[in-house]
Amino acid sequence: MDLARRIPIRDAKGKAIVAGFVEEIRDLKNIRFLVLRDRSGILQVTAKHGEVPEEVFSQIPSLTRESVVCVEGLIVKSPIAKLGRELIPSKIEVLSKAETPLPIEFLRPEIVKTALDKRLDYRFLDLRSPKSYAIFKIQDVLSDAAHRFFKEEGFIEIHTSKLVAQATESGANVFQVDYFGRDAYLAQSPQFYKQMMMAAGFEKVFEIAPVFRAEKHHTPRHLCEYTSIDFEMSYISGPEDIMEVLEKLVIFALGEVQRRCKSELELLKVKVEMPEAPFPKITLRKAYTILEEKGVKPPYMEDLESEHERLLASIIKEETGSDFFFLTEYAWAPDSRPFYVMRKENEPDWTYAFDLFYKGLELTTGGQREHRYEKLKEQCKLKGLEPEDFRFYLDFFRYGMPPHGGSGTGLERFTMQLLNLSNIREATLLPRDPERLIP
């Protein structure tokens, strides 16, 4: 990750042409320095009076921080330059001059603190920070690793429509758009279409794509648009099959980050803790008992509050050493799991739905789906929904549907938790929350 280590030498005499941002300018009268930066690192440009052309020496003080310049010169060894190499300039061309002062300070956050909202207002500058770049380099590796994992496991990549005629469930929490005079919505998830592929006989599919939630959450962990790593697979014997795939996915992705992002992890001061499979698994009912033993009594048959999830995670971490755990068998409560989840045969108040938690935060929602048409239609009614409104979806199940299940994992949350970031917006290139639509 160092510019000085990969300077493109143009000929055998050590001449080079290097372009980048001007990170720093220092004027010591008879010697002047530039520090150039590109995404790989920095390079020092050293101009001594009398040893470089006069026009080059006199040009340096007129440059501004973050201007884009192209420097021609000679590469030489230097005992004082970072990485032991510097560029002696023979020509400096200003490709784009930056205005001054800069609206935010992004290279020295320890000296000048800039609020996250203002950083996001000038996201293009904020992303020039090596730390910001490192975050998204790691996120790129996570996404690439997920893609490679699914391909190697025999999954087919699909690309589903993000404009849908109806919401995944009740129609709440969706963005409505005009579709040539008809109501349409931005997809909350690819759930229905993943299941459509099961009906089509694709058996194993995945998609890494944006999803949309019209939820007015003002928290450091929620977004109105995020990237979901989704998969669905047929002929499962139970939700454990889905959890096993998730374990393999997580371990593979973290291993790739550990292997391919050493310098980025070092810069961010993050050590990847590799989990071991199988991850701890506890039912929601067991979680109630554990929390009650700690003096906390969550409402029965309801999802846990975020503070309860964090407490449960700390207990599991202390007992097992794992940052990951599955919370299983969620309740079939009116406001808990969606109508398409499979209920337990002998305990219909509980389901085969689960969440995967990472460092106390829900990372993944998944489970086994109900594949039997009559039961699914009945469950639709039990949730207060009208089957006719979901006719296109229910038709998938009328002509043969394999037992199946799947999950969706938030890429930004995965990044945030891995890197111990305090706000999910830092792990989102262009975050969309209830207040932000620009940039």
Image (cartoon, rainbow, N blue to C red):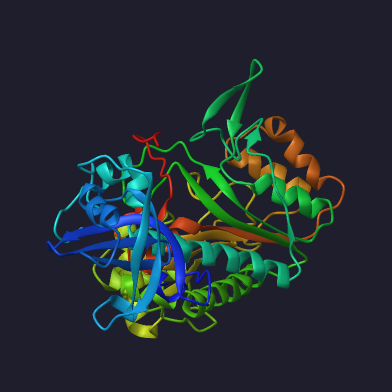
Against 315, is 39 above or below? above
Which residue occupies 32% across, 76% down?
A: 315
Q: Specify whether 30 is left or right of 214.
A: left
Q: Is residue 350 visible?
A: no
Q: Nearer the viewer, residue 62 or 402?
A: 62
Residue ID at (69%, 54%): 370
Q: Nearer the viewer, residue 69 or 404?
A: 69
How far from the left and from the top, in percent, is residue 164?
Answer: 65, 33
Quadrant holding the C terminus? top left
Quadrant assignment, res 97: top left
Give coordinates of residue 163: x percent, y percent.
64, 34
Residue 321 sits above or below residue 86 on the image: below
Task: Give the residue furthest to the right.
Answer: 399
Q: Residue at x 54, y 72 (%)?
A: 253
Q: Position of residue 94 (x, y in %)?
A: 36, 47
Labels in figure, total: 0
Front-most of residues 137 and 393: 137
Residue 92: x %, y % from top left:
36, 54
Of the pair 422 and 401, the residue shown nearer to us: 422
Left or right of residue 195, residue 407 in this image: left
Can residue 393 be seen in this snapshot? Answer: yes
Q: Decide if residue 208 is on the left or right side of residue 433.
A: right
> Quadrant of residue 57 in the image?
bottom left
- The quarter of the image holding the N terminus is bottom left
